[in-house]
Image (cartoon, rainbow, N blue to C red):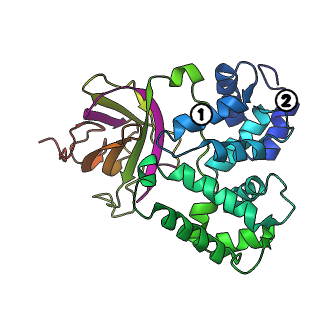
């Protein structure tokens, strides 16, 4: 595709993905800026996985499986249409779509053929290599634990007695078992939010924000969530982050809703030990937000900083503040 989408292409992509035209145009603009060749090479995609899962035993096999499933024209690169499918499935809440994609990837891209026990074993090994770390490999009985997990999945899918499973049965059994679904539905696919060069020297941060369940003081409603734009700056011993717009939650399509924990992934320069954070939203009086806590994990270094918050950011009530400074392990309270 060119640097701009034609009306025909835009209509086709809207129909295929269910995304709005405005959203597609925004994704396309960012895609072309970050991938001026108009595609993501297989090598770059695998490198993104390595950066996204820095402590994994081995992310390459899983990345290759998913890349093959997305690369429908077999040209060893993801064009914008193929990339948009990554976005649609990974950000959507359609469990069947996620399982269909997983089945296609685990089944060597033969989406209509039955999945054999051997193919599933290979896929499960790739998943374990992705979600487990090098430290896990040094634990006693590591091999036994991995085998127990594989046997558990096989039994839940009925492959302890059969040699293969149909796509329909794979989806039915996985959707009916939340633990099985969580394990088998394809794991978070990184998006090319920066070039390979930009990833060098950066560390992976997982930012988890938990919205509380307290009702509004005057309304007694489940109104703790917000639709406002939310921003964060992380203050480290070495440096501060730029302003981070928390907008693409890994866990919920609509972030900052009542009782939800939203997870955001960021690649940031080396900040050093986290000393504090600034958190705020730009909502009006109707968009107050009760935050339970904030947890920032540097997954490259395996360190976590916890901020207990337990307060409203509300322009209409309490101390009417919508921006607060945070210190690890110290609730900020309300201004007097």
Identify the residue at image location x=68%, y=74%.
Answer: 157
Helix, strand or loop at disc 1? helix
Q: Residue 192 placed where, x, y %?
A: 62, 31
Q: Residue 57 placed where, x, y %?
A: 52, 46
Q: Mark 1 or mark 2: which comes first in sequence?
A: 2
Residue at numbered disc 1: 48
Q: Are marks 1 and 2 in contact (CB under 8 Å)?
A: no
For mark 1, does the 10 Å Cα neighbourhood hold few (<14), some (14 to 19), or many (20 or more) residues?
Answer: many
Taking 93 as reference, is 87 above or below it?
A: above
Q: Is residue 180 magenta?
A: no
Q: Residue 40 placed where, x, y %?
A: 71, 29
Q: Is residue 256 visible?
A: no
Identify the residue at image location x=87%, y=38%.
Answer: 73
Q: Is residue 280 left or right of residue 197?
A: left
Residue at numbered disc 2: 7
Q: Is residue 9 visible?
A: yes
Identify the residue at image location x=46%, y=38%.
Answer: 246
Distance from label 1 to label 2 (Cα)? 31 Å
Helix, strand or loop at disc 2? helix
In the rendered image, the residue lying farthest to the bottom is: 161
Taking 40 as reference, is 149 above or below it?
A: below
Label 1 vs label 2, nearer the camera: 1
Q: Is residue 270 magenta?
A: yes
Total numbered circles: 2
Q: Residue 213 placed where, x, y %?
A: 35, 61
Chain part drawn in magenta? 253-280
What is the quadrant of the N terminus in the image? top right
Taking 172 as reference, is 194 above or below it?
A: above
Task: Name which quarter of the figure residue 140 lies in.
Answer: bottom left
């Amino acid at each position: 595709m060119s640097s701009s989408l034609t009306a025909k292409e835009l209509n086709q992509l809207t129909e295929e993905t269910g995304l709005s035209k405005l959203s597609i145009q925004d994704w396309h603009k960012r895609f072309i800026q970050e991938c001026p060749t108009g595609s993501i090479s297989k090598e770059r995609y695998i490198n993104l996985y390595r950066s996204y899962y820095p402590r994994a035993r081995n992310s390459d096999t899983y990345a290759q499986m998913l890349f093959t499933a997305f690369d429908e024209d077999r040209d060893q690169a993801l064009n914008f249409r193929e990339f948009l499918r990554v976005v649609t499935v990974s950000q959507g809440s359609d469990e069947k779509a996620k399982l269909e994609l997983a089945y296609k990837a685990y089944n060597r891209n033969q989406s209509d053929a039955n999945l054999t026990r051997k193919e599933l074993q290979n896929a499960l090994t790739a998943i374990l290599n992705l979600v487990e770390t090098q430290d896990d490999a040094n634990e006693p009985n590591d091999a036994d634990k991995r085998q127990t997990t594989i046997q558990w999945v096989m039994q839940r899918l009925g492959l302890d007695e059969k040699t293969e499973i149909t796509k329909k049965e794979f989806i039915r059994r996985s959707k009916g078992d939340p633990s099985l679904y969580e394990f088998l539905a394809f794991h978070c696919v990184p998006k090319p939010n920066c070039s390979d060069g930009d990833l060098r020297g950066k560390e992976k941060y997982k930012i988890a924000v938990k919205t509380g369940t307290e009702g509004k003081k005057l309304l007694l409603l489940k109104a703790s969530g917000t639709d406002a734009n939310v921003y964060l700056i992380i203050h480290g011993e070495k440096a501060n982050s730029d302003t981070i717009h928390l907008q693409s939650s890994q866990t919920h399509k609509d972030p900052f809703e009542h009782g939800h924990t939203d997870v955001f992934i960021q690649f940031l320069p080396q900040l050093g030990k986290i000393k504090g954070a600034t958190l705020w939203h730009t909502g009006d009086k109707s968009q107050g937000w009760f935050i339970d806590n904030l947890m920032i994990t540097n997954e490259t270094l395996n360190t976590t900083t916890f901020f207990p918050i337990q307060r409203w950011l509300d322009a209409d009530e309490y101390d009417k503040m919508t921006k607060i400074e945070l210190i690890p392990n110290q609730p900020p309270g309300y201004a007097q």
